[in-house]
Image: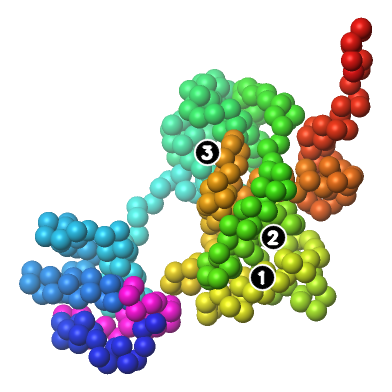
Amino acid sequence: MITDSYIDSSRVVRSLKAGPLGKHIHLVLEHLQRGGYSRVVGHRLLSIVRDFGFWLGATGAGLADIREATAAQYLAERSRHRPRFRGDALALARLLAILREADVIEQRPVPPHDPRSDLCDAYSRYLQHQRGLVRASIESHLWFIRPFLQELGITTYADLAHMSGCDVAAYVERHVGDSGATTARIMCSRVRVFLRYLHAEGFITVDLTTAIPSIRQPGDAKLPTFMPPEDVQRVLDGCDRNTVVGRRDYAILMLLARLGLRACEVARLSLDDIDWRAGQFTVHGKGRKTATMPLPHDVGAAIAAYLQHGRPQSDSRRVFLLAVAPYSGFKGAPSVQTVARLAIKRAGITGPGRRGSHIFRHSLATGLLRSGATLTEIGQLLRHEQQDTTRIYAKVDLDSLRGLGMRWPGGEQ
């Protein structure tokens, strides 16, 4: 930790106070202390800031000249004389953010206005208020809509009147092969929803959704991939619970493996969601839906071990935090997916579909079905809205399916 004694005795801090940035170096030190940075990381950041300050003085530049371009120029010159580390640019970006927060340097210039942003902003509000989508889902829609608008030359509402079904069909044909079949289906779905919105709001007079072809892939075309119970246990046993990261990862994997939570649900889990006395917790699922689930003893014990003997001090209310300063909560599903992927790799488990967090959800459902649980019970645990979603797991219950096979004439069943 960056302690007061370190600040008083550090040569780097003394040289910083005597340099061009000396008047404001206390802002950086306060940031490091609040963020809980280790002495090694903090010393590295302060060294970069010191060298940057001396370079500013040598070039005759001052605080008013500090910009992203200034930092990039310094890093380019620095790389000619010494190895470049990945954290150097991040350290200077953090310095600029600290100085801007204190109004020491000019704020970052506002990018030029994109005329299409008015269309996208209105569509975002529709998705949020009318369809109840969360921010991540809205960004997924916009990720496909922005290039659609740009390629068709649509910047204003007036341009929408010139859009035809042929334009829409041609766009889909040009890009349907950019990625796999799944991405193509998602692209068509997102564009179809957007065109339906434009027609419903009166921005276009003709419903153009019929111009988008259907990309069919039967929902039951593939078997759900899963791990047998012994492989799941190998993944759990691979966590070194003598370390902080190991205790955190073990608690995350227990939520995935024992309760079948989605990655986004684990990332959103808050300290306020857990009712320790009642032995239950609140899950914030897809589509802003919430559900109360029981907290099994082994899962609760894993979370408690992390909270008591691993979770860093932080203002964040998220249960799971990053393992490096600044100690903020997981930003979303990708962080949990990374934990799961590394744990599976560490256990030496290979095979298609065994690289992410959703494999634990499939494995739980498959194991319960083979243990005698009904599809209704599994659907309730996994919080499926439609029975068809749960029914796919019936295909992996080979023992039950074997009895449905008809006897081949003159042969065995």
Figure coloring: rainbow
Q: Tell me whether circle 2 and circle 1 mark residues in contact (CB < 8 Å).
A: yes
Residue 281 against residue 335 in the figure, above or below? below
Q: Residue at x 52, y 38 (%)?
A: 144
Q: CA distance from mark 2 to mark 3?
A: 32 Å
Of helix, strand and loop, which mostly describes the magenta segment? helix
The three-letter amino acid code for the residue at tag 2 is: Leu
Task: Find residue 33 and report its horizontal and vertical position in percent.
Answer: 39, 83
The three-letter amino acid code for the residue at tag 1 is: Ile
Which quadrant is home to the C terminus? top right
Check disc 1 and report the residue beneath it. 303
Q: Is residue 102 shown left or right of residue 346? A: left
Q: Which residues are magenta?
A: 20-41
Residue 174 against residue 2 in the figure, above or below? above
Mark 1 element type: helix
Which quadrant is home to the N terminus? bottom left
Earlier in the chain: of badge 2 and badge 3, it is: 3
Check disc 3 and report the residue beneath it. 144
Mark 3 element type: helix
Task: Find residue 250 and report its horizontal and vertical position in percent.
Answer: 62, 63
Camera sees residue 265: no
Instruction: Indicate whether residue 35 is drawn in magenta.
Output: yes
**Classed neighbour count for the residue bearing mark 2: other residues with Cα under 10 Å, few (<14), some (14–19), many (≥20):** many
Check disc 2 and report the residue beneath it. 255
Mark 2 element type: helix
Instruction: Indicate whether residue 148 is drawn in magenta.
Output: no
Q: Is residue 174 shown left or right of residue 271? A: left
From the viewer's perspective, is the residue at label 2 or at label 3 nearer? 2
